[in-house]
Amino acid sequence: MNFYQASKTSPEGESENLLLDQPTINIGLIGHVAHGKSTLVKALTGIDTVKFDSEIKRNKMTIRLGYANAKIWACSSKGCPRPYRYASSDSSVRSLRCKKCDLEMKIMRHVSFVDCPGHDILIATMLNGAAVMDGAMLVVSADKDCPQPQTVEHLAAIDIMGLENIIVCQNKIDVVQINTAVDNYTNIKKFLSRTFYKDSPVVPVSAQQGYNMDVLCEYLIKNIPVPHKSIDCPPLMLVVRSFDVNKPGCDDIDSICGGIAGGSLIRGTLNIEQVVEIRPGLIVSSSDGSLECFPIRTRVVSLYSESNALKSVIPGGLIAVGTNLDPSLARADRLVGHVIGIPGHMPPVFTHLEIQYFLLNRTVGPARVKKVGKLKPKELLKVNVGSMTCNATVASVEKDMAMLRMELPVCCELESKVTLSRKTDEKWRLISFGVVKKSSKELKIM
């Protein structure tokens, strides 16, 4: 089936019918804590990404990756003035009329927003989200000095991950005087001038009041293109969330739902009734103390993009894959870091990774900047590869190559991007990035 074939096509060549059903791009919300990332997502989608009791109790501070979808529209009349001709809606809306001229609007983007936590202790969670991002919105509060520590750290992280297209949102302009907003805007541009993103647009907004959301929609269309991703190959999906949706006390076995895996397909297509494999899967110790890997095989029983039920999905956007897996295996994000594909076309599982790495000159983020020292044998690091985060011990170092002994087995491809964090002043700080070159020890697949 050609998923891009339709009677109407967007400027980028995507089927409008496809855009109505499934997101085709992931955009991350990054920046310092309490600068309004979750509020901005709600302004664009109508969905509150702060859903867990632990987050609500912490004054709605995002702790886990949040997610919400939105459709971005443009008025069908070329004479409709900008920025009023642009608007957003939640993912369930199938048609929209322009508020300016009351004509039918045309869908331009179907976006999945990945809401990343801004607290400094949650940088690993942010890096997990960065693994599936195609672009980003950096949120900077107009009532705070720029840059704040995680503003710097998050921007450095997406630069390392290779994201080229971002939009900077100067939020909370409704709570400051005009001269303060102008000074803050100047400081943002000055900060960006020292980075790869010096030419990125800065859009003043008020997420709380909904100001300039139409302008932001225009920039989302024009400044963050939908990336090309291959569909004519075996599927591969990174899992960033997983759930058990069954309520406690359910005693009707026929009504129990299997485990749900949420994430983003990075290539290929997934279909209902397809048999898939989840790696690394179950890891057990054998009688001789060595580890053995038991990949999990299951069947796809449902595919959802928020409330939209799908028969097939293509790369781009966040999707939920319903399976007939024991739901306890997916409970409380237990599948995060795993990879889903089809049997016979899966990446290997490694216990040791050899990487080519590049040290940053200094730590990014903390107020007290420190020079980054060389990697040392037996040093403990936190490693992000794909959507997996785990500790690793440096087994050996030679020039720009390092062998890492992973605390948990990891399923990844050669040339996968890796980030390394070191504990500095009791907090994990990003110090290095690299790529997987080869492994000294591949885990035995049972």
Image (cartoon, rainbow, N blue to C red):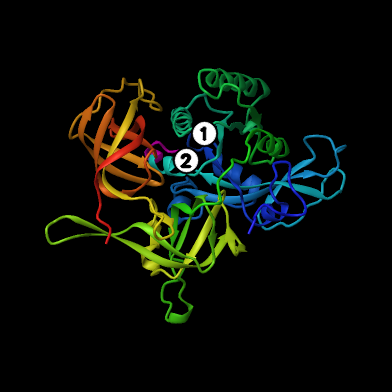
Callout 2 crowding tier (Cα within 10 Å): few <14, some 14–19, many ≥20: many
User: The disc labelled 2 sits on which kind of residue?
Assistant: Ala
Residue 22 locus on image (x, y percent)? 62, 55
* Residue nearest the viewer, comparing 19 with 51: 19
Query: Residue 21, located in which quarter of the rendered image?
Result: bottom right
Is residue 276 located in the magenta-colored stretch of the structure?
no
Q: Nearer the viewer, mark 1 or mark 2?
A: 1
Q: Is residue 418 left or right of residue 81?
A: left
Q: On the rendered image, what quadrant is the N terminus found in?
A: bottom right
Residue furthest left in the image: 288
Q: Is residue 25 left or right of residue 247?
A: right
First to last magenta residue range:
117-123
| Residue in view at x 46 percent, y 52 percent | 236
Q: Marks 2 and 1: in contact by CB < 8 Å?
A: yes
Q: Which residue is mark 1?
A: 163
Q: Which residue is mark 2?
A: 130
